[in-house]
Amino acid sequence: RLRLQVTPLAAVLPFSQFILYIAMANLISPSSSTDDESNVDLLKSFERLLNDRLRNIEKREKELDQRELALVARSQERLAEGTSAATSKCLIHNDSDNDADPTDVLHLNIGGKTDVAVLRRTLTMMEGSLLASKFSGRWEVERDRHGNLFIDQPPHLFVPLLNFLRNKACETPSTTRAKPPPPTQDFCRMVEYYHLTLAVYQIEIFRLTGNDDTAIVDNFPSFRVTTTELCTFDLVPVRHDRAVRSFQVTLGRSITGAQIGWRRDSTLSSRDSTRLLVEGAHDQKGIGDVENTIGLDCIQCGILNDGSFTPLQMMNAAGNDKNVQDEATTAKIGQGSVICCVNGSDKLELYVNGEQIDLGLLALKTSGRNIPCFSLHGELQITSIVFCEPSDDK
């Protein structure tokens, strides 16, 4: 039998090493006569060590059990808080779903009106709009206590928008374009909030001169035009009568002709200016070259008004500083230049790369509406169209 000093070793060595030590000692140590008291001490020391380890394990298990119970209680508490909140206010659910199906039927609560259901693809048909993004499945969407998607808009405003989108979804090449709702102030404000103004009150680039072989036109939403000869275009409202207050274009590549401005909109003058533009197309006449039109000639760097040309550097003869500014502006007109035409309340305004060009007395006098238009040989893109504000809420 082996006589060992166990207690100091048990205090120093880990449990596994202590067992290994005992086993090795029994294997390599020769038997010797020892008294029974020493053997009892050895066994008691081993038992105490084993009990200490068992107590530590039990303590650790209790701690883990307590942590698990705490986590379960916290989860149940949060679930209870969410259920309670749903009875008094809207809950925000994560509607994130990368596999959102366009054919999903969404049930809506529109300002308290809950009997509305719509396909997801109807709400997301205008790509890039806030409305399409909100219901794409990637956003957190508010819901009422019954689980309906909540839209915080008056029903008398949002429902007409929804019906318009439904009509747009049913359009075919052989049918008439969907007619947008009347442009009241409140409706236009809501449509602008959803970034849908040009989707609802559409503007079409209508070719007055040129032909399909020489002009490529991409309408909403890109508004890009490419021509291989001088062609003239109007910006025409589609099934609405909202007036354009301003429009902005960016010149592209291969510009050999670009005249950007306005033409008068009255029954007689509109017909006459269109006729003159068509008749003058073979003579490379564009906006500003004929009566009732005014425009910036980007190639000659001047203003064309009813057939008369005024160079930009001659328009501010009274102020030398402005002459220098205009001469600098003319040098900047070319590929990448940004031209903005504004139909102000009392006069027309023109900006080139953010700098205003003083038109002086040159203006398109009209008792009606001015139609935005341009003549182009090359490439450009319309980057902004702004409507006049509605005057009332009819």
Image (cartoon, helix red, strand yellow):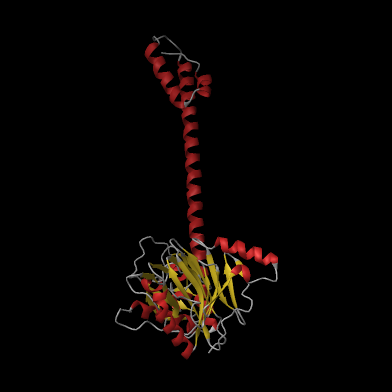
Residue found 43% across the figure and 76% down from its top: 233
> Closest to the observer: 191 or 158?
191
Where is 185 relative to 77, above or below? below
Measuring from the top left, give residue 294's x and y in whole percent. 53, 78
212 vs 348, left or right, is left
Q: Quadrant of residue 114?
A: bottom left
Measuring from the top left, give residue 89's x and y in whole percent. 53, 72
Quarter of the image where the N terminus is located: top left
Where is 223 relative to 14, above or below? below
> Closest to the observer: 87 or 335?
335
Residue found 53% across the figure and 19% down from its top: 8
Measuring from the top left, give residue 252's x and y in whole percent. 45, 62
257 vs 321, left or right, is left
Q: How many marks?
A: 0
* Residue found farthest to the left: 174
Q: Is residue 235 visible?
A: yes
Measuring from the top left, give residue 133's x and y in whole percent. 44, 66
> Closest to the observer: 308 or 260?
308
Where is 394 relative to 378, above or below? below
> Closest to the observer: 147 or 188?
188
Q: Is residue 194 visible?
A: no
